[in-house]
Amino acid sequence: MPPASPFPEARLEDVQGLPPPIGQQAAPLPPYEPGTGAPPPPVSPDAFAGPYATPVPGPMPGPLPGPMPGPAPASFPTAPPVVPVPETLAPEMQAPPVAPPPLPGASGLPSLDEDDDVVDDIDRVFGASGGYPGVVPPAAPPSEPVATVHAVDGQADLLAGATEDHPASVVEHAGAEPTSLDLRAGRAARLFWLWFATNSSWVSVAIGAVLVTLGISLRQAIVATLAGVALSFLPLGLGTLAGKWSGQPTMIVSRATFGLSGNILPAVLGILTRVFWGGVLLWVLAVSFGRLLVFAGLDADLGEQVWTFVVLGVGAVLAALIGVFGYGFIARLQLVTTILSGVLIVGLIAMTYDRVDLAAALAVGDGAWTLALGGTVLVFCFVGLAWVQSSSDLARYQRPESSGAQSMLWASLGATIAPFILIVWGALLAVSDPLLGQEMAEAPLHAIARILPLWYPAPVMLAAGLGLLCSIVLAVYSGGFAIQALGVTARRNATTLIAAVLVAAVAGGLVVFGADAFAISRDLATTLAVPVAAWAGIFAAEMMIRTRRFDAPSLLRPGGVYPRVRVGNLIGLIVISAVSFGFTSATFPGLTWQGFFFPLLGIPMEDPFARSDVGVLLALVLGIFLALVSAIPAIRQQERESLRLEHTGPVPRTTGAVPRITGAVPSATGAFPRTTGPAPNVEPPVVAPPAAEPAMEPLPEPPSLYDTLATAPPPDPFASLDPVAPGDEPPAPPDPLLDWSRGPDPR
């Protein structure tokens, strides 16, 4: 009995005359056991019978009578001969039995859909989970949302590849643009030794000696150092997070805070800061090495001044070359320097421990705590503000998926642990021996080498040279990015060379004029620190407010998320800096105008509070307050616009150029009236008068009604009937009794 059709019953009249169906439901197969080896039973032709079955031709009745007409078919010479298969084969040589396809609705058959490990969501969507031959199963939605990754424009192909570190022997090409995703392989712990090497120079010992010369005790010096280091965590950590988010340098990311054109002032400030600190560190390196060579008797009778300039030139060239190679070489150098500096710092403490006199150090009484406040400002300027505008430059190669909190923590720890140890140790040595402390404040490396064994100045020179060189390299490296932030279109290696030349010029000027280390560390550093602190406060506060990453293309060209000028932040930076300068003091020539608010408040300039440089901290606090109060609406607008661009793509940025293109149309069409008007010296053409129209003849008068009726013939009553020509008679109506097409006669 044929199986029941899955389709509803249809009448023959509905399908008569239609073409046969394309396919039909397969008939059920009889039971079959593959393991027995028996052939399947024959299928009755009646099993395929049905109202929709396609006729199957039967077997040929027999051989064709007679030979086929035409030539015999040619055989293929390359075809293998047909080998007869024996009826009985060994069990291992027999072909496995072929199982029939699974039946619809059959139970007990395994399905790949039962195992989610076998079939994933993509296979399930495209029907790769099984089915019938030639039949595509219906598509099913995934069992859960499929995660997608948003790629930066032009870098979608980098998501599938593995990341790798930047080669040390290859010049870095990334400048203001985001770092390529395939090179962002850095982990959070890498930031520790990158910053440890930068701030592990022995100049920190001199800062500790300078703290003691302010008139504070050892306890106050430790508290001031700890407070200054803690304050440094805020700008360094948030700057690191900005670099990790964007993959771009610090002064490029600053455009989001001050605008693409408004960021020119912070960029100039960044150049001045980088060039100043790079020049000071190169000057310290040159002067210290010149004195050490003379002290060790290795100067070849050339004198300290000659060796100072020689070391200055060599240091500037090395810093320029390493800065041009870029991040890959810098990362390897910082790793080696971190290891050597850590070992030599421990050796320095061990070999100078006998110079410490705890009884004498603890016997020094406390000074005014306002002086300790000045010590906090000094440490904050040297550790935090000196490198805050370079914080993103070393974080550009961090993995985008790494933890931002861990990156901030490792960078802050690496930048502060070594300075804290060296500053406290320098303060302890200076309190124990005031004469040694005064000498360390002026020339730290020479003073330390004088109290060490004769064999140790060589390791001291190596450690001091590498540590100072790493700091100079970072200053040059970041200075190149700051120059690019001005809008200079030169490549990164070219701007790095420019920064290296400026650093060498500043260092040479300090050598020529015989600068005082105390004046530099206290007056010049704090003067530059005031606007940098205001910038850091605004920038760090906005980083705390932001909840989305930066839109990298909008930081490089106008017409995107970020405006040209953010007037509130730019004016706030200028006003806050001006106000804060009224609460600082300086004795360096040309800087004595600072502190103009103290006389107005009745505070003499000799007061410890007037010498504390509290204006640096005031600038930081006012900058944070300004951003928290006024920047939230602008930041939320930027984030909404950035989210819109992520969904719409680069279309808004592309159409932003239309006004500039169509703006040239008025100037082109504005000349149209001048070109179409009559020439000034051309006479107007003479227009001929129109020709006279010919006179029209009068129309004839129509006849009257009387004349028409009088002359018309009488009407014919049969005129409306058309005569019928012979042979055109209409056919006779059919006889209903003889017309069978209408059916039987109802009568």
Image: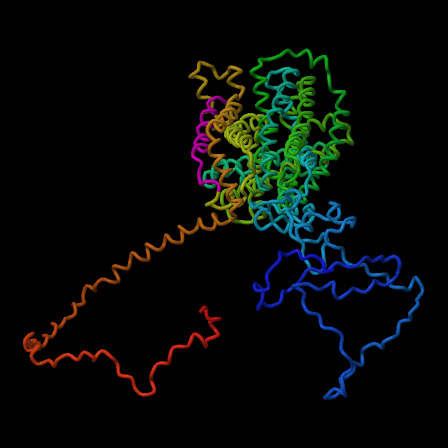
Question: In the picture, residue 568 is in which quadrant?
Answer: top left
Q: Which residue is at 93% across, 68% downward?
A: 88
Q: Is residue 571 a member of the stretch shown in magenta?
A: yes
Q: Coloring scheme of the render? A: rainbow
Q: Residue at x 44, y 20 (%)?
A: 597
Please tell me which residue lies in front, 573 or 429. 573
Q: Is residue 317 visible?
A: no
Q: How many marks?
A: 0
Q: At which x and y percent is residue 239?
A: 58, 34
Tell me if 71 is positioned left or right of 546 in this view: right
- Figure quadrant of the N terminus: bottom right
Q: Position of residue 197 (x, y in %)?
A: 68, 35
List the single residue furthest toward the front. Answer: 747
Residue 321 image position (x, y, % from top left): 64, 46
Whether the magenta-drawn stretch holds residue 110 is answered as no
Residue 285 pos. (x, y %): 65, 35
Location of the C terminus (image quadrant): bottom left
- Nearest to the observer: residue 294 or residue 382: 382
Magenta stretch: helix, strand or loop mostly: helix
Q: Quadrant of residue 402?
A: top right
**Can see residue 358?**
yes
Is residue 585 positioned above or below 471 on the image?
above
Give 550 or 116, whichever is nearer the viewer. 116
Give the residues drawn in magenta, as a range: 561-585
